[in-house]
Image: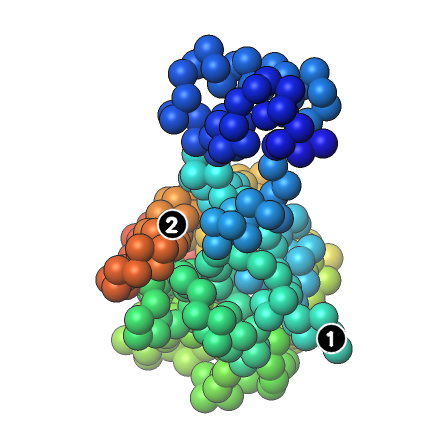
Amino acid sequence: MTLQTIADHLGVSRMTVSNAFSKPDQLSAALRERILSAARELGYVGPDPAARALAKGTTGAVGVLLTSSLRFAFTDLVATGFLGAIAEELGPTGLAITLLTSSDRGDVIPARDVAMDGALVYSCDPTSTAVEYLFRRRLPLVYVDQDPVDGVSSVNVDDRSGARAAARHLVDLGHREIGLLMSGLHGPHGIVTPEDVAIDGHASKQRLLGWLDALGAAGVRPLIARQTGITLEQAKTGARLLLDRPDRPTAILCFSDAVAYGVLQVAADLGIRVPEELSVAGFDDNPLAVQVRPTLTTVRQDVEAKGRAAAAALTAAIAAARTGEPATPQRVLLPTELVVRDSTAPPPA
């Protein structure tokens, strides 16, 4: 069943049938409905998407390059909120989202092989070769939660300012023995110094800088633990490094709310009361922050706004690429806000 079959059945040209599917404004409503009705009657669902993409020079899909595990997109509440906002923003454009892992497994390299019109690079390992493949393909790109680079639009939140506010909040409460719980793919892990963290993602680096801004001004040298990821078990492993010791801190600043949840669980296991004996602050203000007990002091980032801004920047970059116009890179920096809840209080006497 082809376009020509419908055209012969109705006695119209093949181009007229094609316009009914791809350029409906070229036909009268009555003629288009007549063609679509005949297509339904004959069992024709429309032009082949692959052939249409080849003819137009577009795929109708955009990639979202994530970490080495795609499970992150479905289990991390911040990631799901971000991707949901992108999907909603892209809905009216007809563009679909394709999730890409940044890992290379033999001959399977999604960033090199998957057809797409552009891509968002979202919170990826800075050493990943997947980003290099996207660059070499000359695709329109937007960086999200990544270090900005020349010629590429970027969307970030003000991680440093938010982290600084959280650290200052603990200092103002009177805390001087403060721990930091971070995560990162590359070593070293365990108890580290700020100088040890040479390779890390944009958000991790900026949040560490923000914490150190406030703590350094107060003369506080923090105890820093670094874990390999952000799963609950990994967070609990890092939390034990800070809490299961005689000189444990009276407050902990966490890379994320998911990590802070692990701290709350370890504190409960060790019989440490929050916030009476230990204050805990997270980052992101994801839905988990108000579901845990005590409710979590955290730094709010607007994930919905970040998703919308990323989608808008990418569609603009794709449109510029289609017309051959030089694209003007956008630099979006979204504000953060400290949200004080029940998990922080003055240190014990």
Image quadrant where residue 26 sits:
top left
Which element type, helix, strand or loop, lies under badge 1? Answer: loop
Dot 2 amino acid type: Thr
Q: Would residue 300 be visible to someone looking at this image?
A: no
Residue 55 vertical position relative to residue 216 in the rendered view, above or below:
above
The residue pinned by badge 2 equals 315
Residue at 38% over, 25% down: 25
The residue pinned by badge 1 equals 107
Indicate the position of residue 314 as horizontal and vertical percent values: 39, 54
Towards the viewer: 162 or 122:
122
Towards the viewer: 103 or 275:
103
The quarter of the rendered structure image containing the N terminus is top right
Residue at 42% over, 63% down: 141
Towards the viewer: 195 or 202:
202
Q: Would residue 185 be visible to someone looking at this image?
A: yes
Dot 1 amino acid type: Asp
Indicate the position of residue 245 as horizontal and vertical percent values: 65, 75
In 3D space, how far apart are the residues under numbered discs 2 and 1 (Cα atoms)? 30 Å
